[in-house]
Image (cartoon, rainbow, N blue to C red):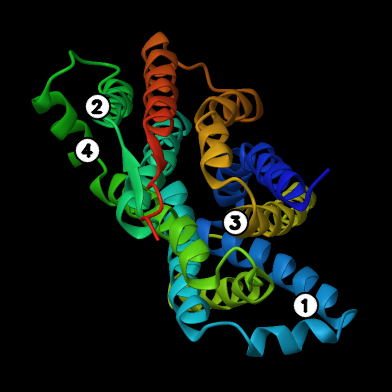
Amino acid sequence: MTRVDLSTGSGLGAILLWSATFAFARSLSEQVGPLTGGAAAYLIAGSLCLLRLATSPASWSRFLRLPRLYLFGCGSLFVFYTAAVYLAVGLAQSREQLLEIALVNYLWPALTILFSLCLLKKQATLWLILGTILALTGVCLVMTQDTGVSWMSFAGHVQSNPAAYGLALAAAISWALYSNLTRRWSGPEGDGAVELFIPATGLILLALRLLTTEPTGWSLRAVGEASGLAAVTTLAYLLWDVSMRKGNLLLVVACSYFTPLLSTVVSCFYLRVSPSPKLWIGCLLLVSGSLMTWRSVFDRPAPPS
C-alpha cells in the first residue's frame, strides 16, 4: 500500500470519528456549558498532543521549518472553526435544532470543492452548479420542516436563532478554507502543525470561558464525555491533516459528504431525537448535491512545455 493510499485512508477514519462530534459536544454542553466543555475537551486533547511531541524531540524542530503563512493562517482558521462550532452547539435552542445547525456546518465539503477552483487551480463542469443548488436546497428543506418551503419561512427560521445558524455557516466556510489552504501553504510533502493547533485552541476556549459565566455541573458522565471527545478530536484532526496534505483530497472530500448522514444517525441515537421525514430528505439532498459537486471537479491540464 502506497503512502498516498494510507493518507487517504486516514481521511476516511477522520470522517467516521467526526460523525460522533456533535452528539458528544451537545450532551457535554448541556451539562457544563459549551465553552467549558469545549475548553476541557481541547485542553485534554492538547495535553495528549504535547505528550506525543515530548516523546519525539525531533518533532519540535520540524515546526521551525514550516511556512509562517501556514502556521498562523491555517492555525487561526482552525481555532476559529472550533470556537464557532462549540458556540453554535451551545446556542441551539433544542436538540432538534442541533441537527439543523449540524447540517448547516456540513456545507463545508461542498464549499471545499468550490474554493478549490481558485485556491488549488481546479476546473469544473456545469454539474457543479446543479450540485451546489441541490446541497443548498437540502439545507433549506431541513430549516423549514414545520412550515411550507419558501424564502419567507426560511428567513423566519434563521431569525429565530441567527447567532447559532450564522456561526455554523461561518464554521463551514472557515473549515473549507482550512482544508484547501493546508495543502496550498504547507504542500503535499510538508509537515503539519495540528499538534500545536489543538492546545492553542484549548487555551483560546479557556480564555473565552473566563470572560463569560456558564452554569457548570461536572459529573462522572461529563468527565467521560469530555475525555472521549478529546480522544476523538485528537485522532480525527491528526488523520485529517495528513490526508489533506498527502492524500487524494478530492476522494476524501467526496467521502466526507456522507458525514451529515452519519452524524445525523449518531446524534439521533445518542441524543434520543426523532427526526422528521423532511430532515432525512434534506440530508440526502445535501449528500447528493455534494457528491455531484465532487464529480464535476478535475485538475487543470498542465500547460505545454
Q: Are marks 4 and 2 in contact (CB under 8 Å)?
A: no
**Residue at (28%, 50%) from the top-left corner?**
166
Of callouts 4 and 3, the N-terminal one = 3
Q: Give me the C-alpha separation between circle 4 and circle 1.
A: 40 Å
Q: From the top left corner, tell me how far across and down residue 128 is, in percent.
A: 29, 31
Mark 1 neighbour density, 10 Å: few (under 14) some (14–19) many (20 or more): some
In screen coordinates, is 280 left or right of 240? Answer: left
Q: Is residue 258 left or right of residue 110?
A: right
Mark 4 to mark 2 CA distance (whole Å): 19 Å
Q: Of marks 3 and 2, which one's residue comes earlier in the chain?
A: 3
- Mark in the foreground, 3 or 2: 2
Mark 1 = which residue?
50
Q: Residues within 10 Å of mark 3 (few under 14, many from 20)?
A: many
Residue furthest left as drawn = 152
Disc 4 is placed on an element classified as helix
Q: Work out whether residue 176 can be spotted.
A: yes
Nearer the observer, disc 3 or disc 1? 1
Residue tagged by mark 3?
Answer: 32
The quarter of the picture where the C terminus appears is bottom left
Real-space CA distance between mark 1 and mark 2, rounded to the nearest whole angstrom: 43 Å
Q: Earlier in the sequence, mark 1 or mark 2?
A: 1
**Mark 4: few, some, or many residues within 10 Å (few <14, many ≥20)?**
some
Amino acid identity at mark 2: Ile
State which tag comes first along the sequence, 3 or 1: 3
Image depth: mark 1 or mark 2 in front: 2
